[in-house]
Structure formats: structure tokens, C-alpha cells
Amino acid sequence: MFEDESEIYNIFISQLKDDDEEYNRFIGKLEASYDFQWKNHSIFDRTDKEQLTEQMKNVDVVIILSGMYSKNKNLIQQEIDLARKLEKPIVIIRPYGMENVPGSIEDTASEVVGWNTSCIIDSVRESLESNEGI
């Protein structure tokens, strides 16, 4: 059975500011993949929980860049809490160049992966498949 490679995945990606190096590196990896179509629903310019909810409510998966956790624990935790409330699968990306995920956020994840593009894409697809059975 072949996957429908024309499927567009709606994704929310954690970010702290619009020029964050880790966020931009991650976006670059997704954009470089020829067989993964996606739409980014995260917009940095948000001021309250309602705007965050609006961005996240129609996504297929929430991606948390865990390297940002130490920079703003409250915001990242708010994103995780909202994703859980909305019953969205959560894919956690390890901090760039490291193996350990900070804090206890690993326990909230559907998947935890590093920075390998194929692994990231597979984890998005797998988290959606496993979430369909809920």
C-alpha cells in the first residue's frame, strides 16, 4: 500500500521569536523534504491564549522544539498543555546536538526524535496513525 504523498499535514511548531535559530533550522529541514507537504499554523505574533488556541485547534500535530524549553518554560508548557487539552499528538524534537529532553516534557509526547529529517517526518505520520485509534 502506498502512502498518499499529496496529503498536506497541518502542523503547529513551537517558537519563541520570529528569528529563532532553532526554529528556522527546523523549518529548513521540513522545507528540504521533497515528499512531505505541510502547512505551518504557528505564528509568532500572538499575545494571548485565545490566539494560541486559534492557531492550534485545526492542526494535525503539535511539534515542540525542546531546546526552547529552558529559554521559556512557561510558554512551551502552555503549548503542551493546550495540545493535550485539544487532544493533539505531540512530537518532541530533542535539543539540537543533544540526546536528552529537558524537564518532564518527554512524558507528554506521542514521539520523541532528533533532527534527522526522515525521522521527523516518520514521527509526524506515525503519531497521527496512533492517534486515530483513540
Image (cartoon, helix red, strand yellow):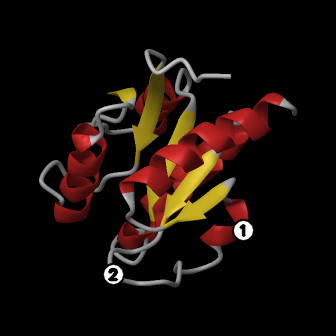
x%, y% of residue 129? 72, 34
Query: Which of the two marks, 1 or 2, is nearer to us in this view?
Result: 2
* Earlier residue among tags 1 and 2: 2
Quarter of the figure that contains the N terminus: top right
**Residue beneath the point at 72% across and 68% down:** 107
Q: Nearer the viewer, residue 15 or 4?
A: 4
Q: Against 1, is 101 above or below?
A: below
SS for dot 1: helix
**Relative horizontal placement of residue 34, taking residue 111 as reference (left or right):** left
Whether residue 88 can be seen here = no
Quarter of the figure that contains the C terminus: top right
**Residue at image mark 1:** 107
Whether residue 54 can be seen here = yes
**Residue at image mark 2:** 97
Give the alpha-carbon distance from disc 1 to disc 2, as whole Å. Answer: 20 Å
Q: Which image quarter: residue 36?
A: top left
**Residue beneath the point at 24% across and 63% down:** 22
User: Which amino acid, by three-letter code, is at mark 2?
Assistant: Gly
**Relative horizontal placement of residue 9, taking residue 67 as reference (left or right):** right
**Residue beneath the point at 65% across and 76% down:** 104
Q: Nearer the viewer, residue 72 or 1?
A: 1
Q: Nearer the viewer, residue 46 or 64?
A: 64
SS for dot 2: loop
Q: Which image quarter: residue 111?
A: bottom right
